[in-house]
Image (cartoon, rainbow, N blue to C red):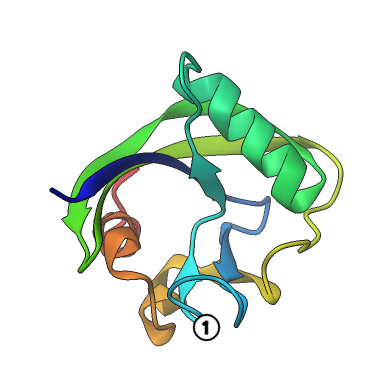
Amino acid sequence: MKKKIKVVAAVIENEHEEILCALRSPTMTMPNMWEFPGGKVEEDEDLHTAIQREIQEELGCVVEPEELHNEHVHEYETFIIQLIAIKCRLVDGTPLPSEHSKLLWLKREHLSSLVWAPADIPAVELLRKGWT
């Protein structure tokens, strides 16, 4: 039986209506694919606490979770991911990559120009369609 992993991902939009995209490093699973930053929800941790902790750890900044963007379950070859994308507002600091190779701010209409991790694609599609 495959392990199921619960993951939160931050959909962060800046004042220029650009979305923050993160490139997975060559040392991560699914290397060189784009994703929304975030990570695993720890046991007994709520979604808002998890996304705030993960963004602080990964990007060195503070976000305020605002609303659920979407939730999607994707089955990979060796595990199943429950990805919960949460719209967040940047409240302190500038996102800097510590685990990712690169960060990029991109307009919604250009999101499809990147090669996304499969679990992130439904969230990308909703953004491209202009759904808020």
Name the residue rendered at 37%, 70% in the picture: 117
Name the residue rendered at 69%, 76% in the picture: 101
| Residue farthest left in this picture | 1
Name the residue rendered at 78%, 54% in the picture: 95
61 or 129: nearer the viewer: 61
Image location (x, y in percent) of residue 44: 47, 13
Image location (x, y in percent) of residue 12: 58, 48
Is 40 located above or below residue 75 in the figure? above
Is 56 located above or below residue 122 in the figure? above
Image location (x, y in percent) of residue 111: 42, 74
Is 125 located above or below residue 26 in the figure? above
Image location (x, y in percent) of residue 75: 17, 58
- Name the side, left or right, on which 128 lies relative to 43: left
Neighbour class for label 1 at 10 Å: few (<14), some, many (≥20)? some
Q: Quadrant of residue 53?
A: top right
- Name the side, left or right, on which 72 lies relative to 20: left
Q: Quadrant of residue 16?
A: bottom right
Figure label count: 1
- Name the residue beneath numbered marker 1: 32
- The quadrant in which the C terminus is found is top left
105 or 116: nearer the viewer: 116
Q: Amino acid at mark 1?
A: Asn
- SS for callout 1: loop
